[in-house]
Amino acid sequence: LCRGGLAERLCRLQNRERSAISFWRHQCLSDAKIASDESGVLIVKILEIFEECTIQVAICQQLEKSPATLSSQDTAISAREPILKVLFAKETAAHLKTRPQDVIHIYPPWQKLLLKNADVPVIMNTYFSQKVLLSDHSEATEKTYSLTKMLIRKNIISLAQTFRLDDLDDELHQEPSANQVACVPLLHNNCDSKHQSAVNDSLLEMVESQGAVGWREVQVQVVIQRVYCLPAREGYRSHVQGNKPLWMFCRLCLLVQDAYGMFSEVQLHSLSSADEMEQYCRRWEGKFCCLAGMKILQRTTRGRALGLFSLIDSLWPPVVPVKVPGQSQDHEMMTTNHPPPSFCYILTVQSGEIRVEVDEEKPVSNLYQPAAVLGLKEILQIDGCNQRCSFWARVLYIRVQAKHSVPVNQREIWLFVSDSTLQDVAHITPKVVAVSVAASCVLSTEITEALSATSQLVFFKDALWGNGRIICVERTVLLLQKPLLCSAAGADLSELTGPVRLDELDSTTQANSICTVRGTVVGVNESTAFSWPTCDRCGNGKLELCPQDRRQLYCSQCSEVVISPVLKMQLEIFLSCPSQTRRIVKVKVWHKMSFGVLSIERLGSYEVQSVLGKEVGLLNCYVHSVTSHPDCVMLEEIVLL
């Protein structure tokens, strides 16, 4: 909306109006008595109800005083009392649940409209209205009525009648015979026939007709575009002790799309198993689904939820024409030339009611857009920011963020990956790409356990590309197997063959990358050299003194005495590299990795002179930092998976 424009001012006015009505109704509920003695309160008794253009029209009789203390026989119709036509908005009518013989108090500022050639005045602006129960109306009668649907006559008026066109068919002048319809529109049920509730195909229509509280009587049919998990609220996770996997604090979510192209995120139940998300992905994506018992958590916009809308934008425009609201739904009127959605409703299930029915027997919907798989080379060439991408790559090395103040299960993880598009082509830089996995990206235990053991091929679905980085954020899914439904988009998805090559250290090497280095040892930082014993069974480096025998070491992980500990040692060396003649190259090396190359004969000790002048390479290293003043590169030797 244009700032200061008419639409923005009207929107503000509507918001204030809704707030005032909600506040007034809350006051009425909290008050024990109905203040009918206020000046200007209009008291009416409903004689007949019908609906016209979504407005409920009530033919009413005006009463002089409130019948709250009288019986229904005392409020019989009198010819002397005037007849009024009272208009109730759709939301007001739904709140009042009016029926004939009801008595309604209408509070100011109601307005009376006198029409030409009409004897019955019209009462408008009836938002502040309250129904009065007579003394002989018991609670049982009210409950019995609430279980039945109120049939309201609808006056169907064509535009031709409204504008008094001459070429009318005779049928238009006749009132349809089946003019008694339920308050809830009954549409064709495309879902499970065992449920007799109404089915719609428009999310927006359901929200507008049923309101933010939720809908129970009707269903809406949608297509499941994506299945993923979102982490639970931080307040909930902060109360949980220990480093439990993140999937234990997340909810299963669906990104759905209706026949009009409208998207909505549906938040379902919490997961009880790490494997459930992958199963739901395989079973549900692309299928038709009926939602019922939903309520609105939030109406979010593009500026408030960039991550959600980056995923929606990757699914836009639709692959098939979608319906256009307010137009004929003939195939010629359906189109894919729509602007992308600017808002999205976040839905959740009503308390204790989970009504998400997925028709797994039906074929995949034509509206479904599977993940478009690209090669890493193509992704690195994408222009733009905040674009979703999917790829299939091998994880070569894992590094966890080294911030001790952050819990382990909330630390950022870096996965260094490569594929055939980077490895099989000469003179391609880089050979390996760093993928950041944010704490908000839910990783199953299957993924974490598999990656901790060996190098794995991983399918990254809907990762975020921008500013030269690939990031796994909320709504990104990592799978060990490629989904059955995915679009290759012409990408080379052949698996890696032969050994993996890393980029050699040069002037273009950046921090937080991995590379290979070779050179001659020209210095040793003796102040940083140290050694420590580790368990020969599990590799635990935090051994303790044995309580029974203080001369022996004890491993708390194995719960056994360590008879033959393995001594590890760290050493920082300075290299002279042929490709880095003017740069200081400092490498942190570890025992049993490179000390064999350095010919350190005695375990746990070394002679500086025996190390200087030794040739080192090729070492696989992680780049900690690259500085220009002084011109220095800090590396750490690593072991690839």
Image: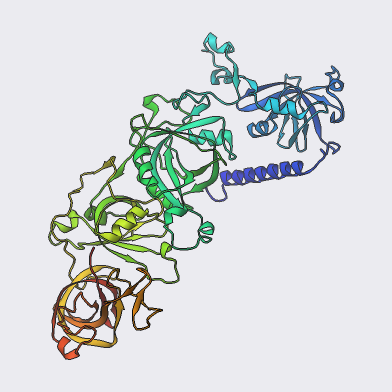
Residue shown at 29% from the left, 43% from the top = 483
314 or 144: nearer the eye? 144
Residue 465 seen in this snapshot: no
627 is higher (above) or lower (below) than 304: below
Q: Quadrant of residue 64?
A: top right
The count of marks equals: 0
Q: Is residue 582 left or right of residue 333?
A: left
Give the x, y percent position of residue 594: 19, 76
**Direction front: furthest residue:** 548
Q: Quadrant of residue 514?
A: bottom left
- Residue at point 28% right, 69% down? 537
Residue 552 at x, y percent in the picture: 33, 80
* 500 lies above or below 78: below
Residue nearest the observer in this picture, 558 or 204: 558
Please identify the quarter of the rendering in which residue 420 is found.
bottom left
Q: Is residue 125 left or right of residue 334?
A: right
Residue 232 appears in view: yes
Asked if residue 364 lies left or right of residue 174, the reply is left
Indicate the position of residue 220 as horizontal and vertical percent values: 48, 32
Query: Residue 365 versus residue 589: which sits nearer the camera?
Result: 589
225 relative to 613 in the view: left or right: right
The answer to whether 567 is drawn above or below residue 105 in the figure is below
Q: Quadrant of the C terminus?
A: bottom left
Colouring rule applied to residues = rainbow
**Position in image of residue 611 (x %, y %):** 17, 86
